[in-house]
Amino acid sequence: MRYSLGRKFSVFYASLIYLFLYMPIAILILYSFNQSKLNAVWTGFTFDWYVKLMQNSDVLEAMKTSLIVALISTLAATMIGTLAAVGMYRYHFRGKTALDAMLYLPIVIPEIVMGISMLALFAQLKVPLGYFTLIAAHITFSVPFVVVVVRARLAGFDKSIEEAAMDLGATPWQTFVKVTMPVIAPGILASAMLAFTLSLDDVIISFFVAGPASATLPLKIFSMVKFGVTPEINALSTLMLVVTLAIVIFAERIRMRKE
Amino acid sequence: MKAPVIGSATSSRPAATTPNRPVRDYGKTWTIGPILIWMSALFLLPLILILGVSFFTRSSFGGIELPLTVENYVRFFDPLYFKILWISCVLAFFTTAICLVLGYPFAYIVARSPINYRNILMLLIIVPFWTNSLIRTYAWIVLLRTEGVINTILMQLGIISQPLPLLYNETAVLIGLVYTMLPFMVLPLYASIEKLDKSLLEASSDLGAKPVHTFWKVTLPLTAPGIMAGSLLVFIPSLGLFFIPDLMGGSKTVLIGNLIKNQFLTARDWPFGSASSIILMGLTLLFITAYILITKDKEGKELL
């Protein structure tokens, strides 16, 4: 009796938390299909806001910026991070602890400090803010996450397989490509997905290092929200949610299949 | 896989034992080199730069000039600014506390649910965390604003005649922060509760402890590392999330993140902005060090 009461309460409580988490997002999506510009009274179903969005050149420009920045920074961060993870797994060297700390710090310190400090650097070096600074900044905050994810994958990797390859005459590079890579490939892919979503979603760091002509999608949303709530923003947010979820589901499926 | 049997099995650097080509292993340079250069140039150098800037004087054009001074740090402790730090910490503290109170029972329920449900239940918590935090903040604005969903429904039902001022106050900021940070609390809590050895709880109740006692004396201390990690993961970002106070507090609530942002972009006082950033970072590192010291005693080196 007590057991079943406790269980009912558990289900009830967990449902409340899920409701708290999902209700605002659900309502946001729902109202992106509402005819009323006022946004709160339901007057009928429409795709108008999505059509309007696709005609808004500023939004399309921001989408392009976001995608380019995310793609390039993901590629670069995944390469740098994967190499580092393999190196840190394979070799012992002086200053490894210091490097560890340098990779751990960006994950734990408030993003705003990173944003501000990179802005200060670019300003001192007179680098104009734009695509270049955005991409550089996104690589910087993604790299530590890539290292963490790939290292986690390497942790379960039997070092003796690599040694066997090298004993049989493979060069370190051959060993990496033919032995190590296939094993950690799912980890690399997962880390690339993570870097991609981090880049697509970043608000705080981009806020400081984006130039006036290189606003990313979240920055565009930020400035739109400041001028007021419109169903167009709902539609844009819905699109971004769908894209992010698609990436996550895709990454999750790859991870499940490989394990 | 069958390990090849080789005479010199003790040699860990086999390249040196390959007779015909003495391959020098450049791997270390090529794997560690790029990240070292990149992170030094774009993470470490910028931090050192703002540390430097924080000791300069603001020039009348918004640039920096000599003389060197500690004035920017002293100024932070001026009641006006110190109050901002204080309010930020109070708000971040309440965010952390509410996340903990909401998240602990939830993580407990999930960790004790049938094993085949657990992954999907946790995935449902992580999914919102993957979505853009700005969009999640915006979703609450849609709900809470004067012409928002909640006010509209309440007025149509005739419960209220005037819209309630739900947005643009500190409660709204708190809701926004809790909503954004809750998954960060639940994840480490879940990890530590799931690891909890059930037989210890049974032993405690077998020995006559009431459930409340078992919870306070066994469950809570054993899951303390999860509580600490979750609190850290919620508290620190809460201090810097400037867009939630900006959008949901109506710029009335100025937090340390907003202060830093304004010093750089509006007031153009880089030395003071840098000093504030350094103080925020120092505070963060202080918390992390405390966390490491406290948890290290209890269970080895377990971080996050």
Image (cartoon, rainbow, N blue to C red):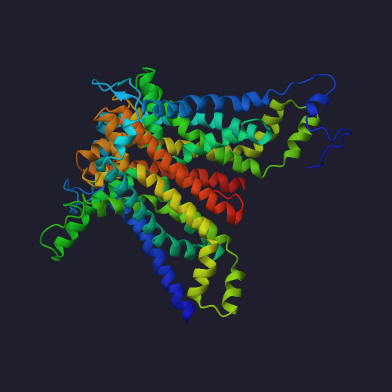
> Can you give x and y, in whole percent of width and height, for residue B65 in the image?
31, 20
Please tell me which residue is depicted at 46% across the width and 34% down the height of the picture: A141
Going by the picture, which residue comes out furthest to the top? Answer: A126
> Can you give x and y, in whole percent of width and height, for residue A59 in the image?
28, 32
Observer-nearest of A108 and B14: A108
Observer-nearest of A250 and B5: B5
> Can you give x and y, in whole percent of width and height, for residue B281 in the image?
41, 38
Please tell me which residue is depicted at 48% across the width and 24% down the height of the picture: B41
Residue B100 is drawn in which quadrant?
Answer: bottom left
Q: Is residue B290 left or right of residue B140?
A: right
Please tell me which residue is depicted at 35% across the width and 33% down the height of the picture: B275
> Can you give x and y, in whole percent of width and height, for residue A238 in the image?
32, 44
Q: Is residue B224 left or right of residue A116?
A: right
Relative height, residue A35 to residue B279 (above, below)? below
Tell me, yes or no, if residue A228 can be seen here: yes
Number of on-image labels: 0
Please tell me which residue is depicted at 30% across the width and 30% down the height of the picture: B264
